[in-house]
Image (cartoon, grey):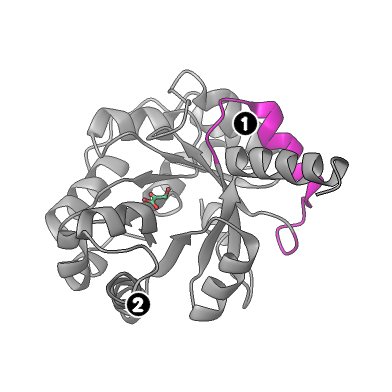
Amino acid sequence: GTAIKKTLDIGSNAAYGFWLTLPSAAVAKTILRSCSTDPEAGFSWVLIDAEHGLISDKDYYELTNAIASEGASPLIRVPWSEEWLIKRALDAGAHGIVTPMCHSAEDAARIVRYSKYPPLGTRGYGPMFATHAIPGVGTAYDAGAATGLLVVVQIESKSGVENIEEITRVEGVDVVFIGPFDLAKQMGVERGGEEHEAAIQRILNATKSAGKKAAIFCTDGAQARQRERDGFDMVSVTTDVGLLGDGMKHELQAARGF
Ligand code: 3PY
């Protein structure tokens, strides 16, 4: 179980990950192998996006296993913080779940409950396939699942920011993950503007004060590097789909001599 959380404890560096929006184990493995399978140098986690991407729960098992086989931790962002959605993601071998739009401490406590077996929570029992994507965990899954699976709540709304101090104090919440795009839209402020950045800093500070891990979504490596300097523990560098488009555009422009 603790092996799962270790992916976030890699010395003084942030744990870097990326966003997978395509339902393709081949894409995930290609990216992980092209970088490095050493978590100190490569990616230590991959976010499987079932909220906005093209991924559905039919894809989970193959994706979690492919990602885990390359030494990275598969995290699934569920479409919404519903008990049955969280259960299916964990049962498919996710090393943790990420839930969109956590607005309050009540939301956070509910998400923790859905993610844990009794007596800590209400998660139904059926981990027949969950262990396949967790190398070496074997029958220790039940015990490890209580503490080893990451519970990641996304803060990306005005109320989420207003309630951040209480949210970070909820026991069982491991990581507070900022969604900068939704945060700007939900607050009705400009992304990258002063109010947006102030909200990000407030979330970061509250999270660190509570002794929890802080995470954020970025769109490129330079931004990710800056967020690591800001003190984020877990940083998403970019997305599969963003990378494909940008990479092709860059090469086509080079070919055309632009
Ligand atoms: C956001 O920025 O809103 C996210 O959730 C990451 O895509």
Vertical relation: 72 (above or below) 190: above
Position of 37 with respect to 183 (left or right) is right
Q: Position of residue 157 (x, y in %)?
A: 22, 57
Side of 26 where 155 appears, left or right: left
User: What amino acid is found at the position of numbered circle 1 in the picture?
Assistant: Asn
At 28% from the left and 30% from the top, the residue drawn is 124
Dot 1 surroundings within 10 Å: few (below 14), some, or many (20 or more)? many
Residue type at numbered disc 2: Gln
> Compared to 39, does 199 lie above or below?
below
Q: Find out if the beta carbon at label 1 lies less than 8 Å from the nearest ligand 1 atom.
A: no
Please report the residue visible at 51 percent of the width from the left and 33 percent of the height from the top.
93
Residue 6 image point, x, y percent: 57, 61
Q: Position of residue 4 (x, y in %)?
A: 54, 52
Numbered label attached to residue 173: none
Q: Left or right: 204 with respect to 217?
A: left
Mark 2 / mark 1, whichever is N-terminal? 1
Q: Which residue is mark 1?
A: 65
Identify the element where label 1 is drawn. helix
| Whole-number angstrom distance, CA of label 2 to CA of label 1 | 35 Å
Instruction: Give the labeled residue for mark 2.
Output: 201
Residue 229 highlighted magenta (yes or no): no
Q: Which residues are magenta?
A: 20-41
Could you say which is closer to the camera, residue 147 or residue 114?
114
In magenta stretch: residue 26: yes
Assign a secondary structure to mark 2: helix
Residue 114, image quadrant: top left
In the image, residue 37 lies at what x, y percent? 77, 50
Residue 73 lies, with reference to residue 167, above or below; the image says above
Counting other residues with Cα less than 10 Å from the Cα at mark 2, is it few (<14), some (14-19), or many (20 or more)?
some
